């Protein structure tokens, strides 16, 4: 193996700062390349993630896992940002009949910052619960019971998990299906 040998001070510093400091910063401190830091960690089987220049969380200040994120977690996002009433989002009706708005930092926004109002209303009706965000991320859909896409009354909205049916399954349908299969379903 080539390259210069590691001193005890360098080894202790790198071990203490892996996953905390960007490896580019550690490399500069010891006049080494970032690849040397990565290689040193890999050779020792360290499972600590080495952060490249990722942004700090806008709420708590720790390094974010993804370069494109502003907050490190949903908890930090929720703690740092609250959404006001609907009039703070400029809602418009799209050609397909859904009401959408633009709010880039909204937890239900897509990559372009577009939020579908039925998701926003359902989230609000459920006290901005994280499970609503997780359901959307896992492929769930919101069904308009009366078929009118711009009728976003909470009583008209039904969460459907993805499944064999192209538009998903209603919770009641899932329970009925499970009971027909012989399972006993106990609701919380």
Image: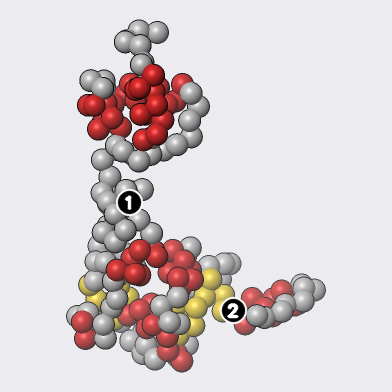
- In this view, the residue in front, 93 or 23, is 23
Q: Which residue is mark 1?
A: 62
Q: Position of residue 25 (x, y in %)?
A: 25, 32
> Which quarter of the figure has residue 137?
bottom left
Q: Position of residue 131 (x, y in %)?
A: 49, 71
The residue that appears at 67% across and 81% down in the rendered structure is: 187
What is the crowding at mark 1: few (fewer than 14 residues within 10 Å), some, or many (at least 20)? some
Q: Residue at x 32, y 48 (%)?
A: 63
The quadrant of the picture occupied by the N terminus is top left
Crowding around mark 2 (Cα neighbors within 10 Å: few <14, some 14 to 19, many 20+) is few
Give the alpha-carbon distance from disc 2 to disc 1, as whole Å: 38 Å
Q: Residue furthest top?
A: 2
Disc 1, SS: loop
Observer able to see residue 168: no
Q: Which mark is residue 171?
A: 2
Q: How many marks?
A: 2
Depth check: give the residue in front, 155 or 51. Answer: 51
Q: Earlier in the sequence, mark 2 or mark 1?
A: 1
Residue 107: x %, y % from top left: 34, 68
Q: Is residue 68 above or below residue 9?
A: below
Residue 162 higher or lower than 148, as above or below:
above
Residue at the image point whose x is 36% and y is 16% from the top: 7
Res 9 visible: yes
Does the residue at mark 2 contact the one at mark 1 (Cβ under 8 Å)? no
């Amino acid at each position: 193996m080539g390259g210069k040998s590691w001193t005890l001070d360098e080894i202790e510093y790198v071990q203490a700062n892996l996953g905390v400091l960007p490896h580019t910063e550690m490399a500069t401190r010891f006049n080494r390349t970032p690849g040397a830091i990565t290689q040193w960690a890999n050779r020792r089987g360290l499972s600590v993630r080495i952060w490249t220049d990722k942004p700090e969380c806008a709420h708590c200040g720790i390094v974010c896992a993804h370069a494109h994120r502003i907050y490190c977690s949903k908890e930090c996002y929720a703690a740092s940002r609250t959404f006001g009433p609907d009039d703070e989002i400029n809602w418009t009706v799209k050609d397909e009949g859904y009401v959408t708005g633009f709010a880039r930092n909204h937890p239900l926004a897509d990559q372009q910052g577009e939020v579908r109002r039925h998701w926003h209303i359902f989230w609000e009706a459920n006290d901005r619960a994280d499970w609503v965000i997780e359901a959307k991320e896992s492929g769930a859909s919101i069904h308009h019971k009366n078929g009118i896409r711009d009728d976003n009354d909470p009583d008209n909205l039904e969460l459907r998990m993805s499944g064999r049916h192209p538009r998903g399954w209603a919770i009641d349908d899932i329970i009925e299906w499970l009971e027909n299969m012989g399972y006993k379903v106990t609701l919380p």
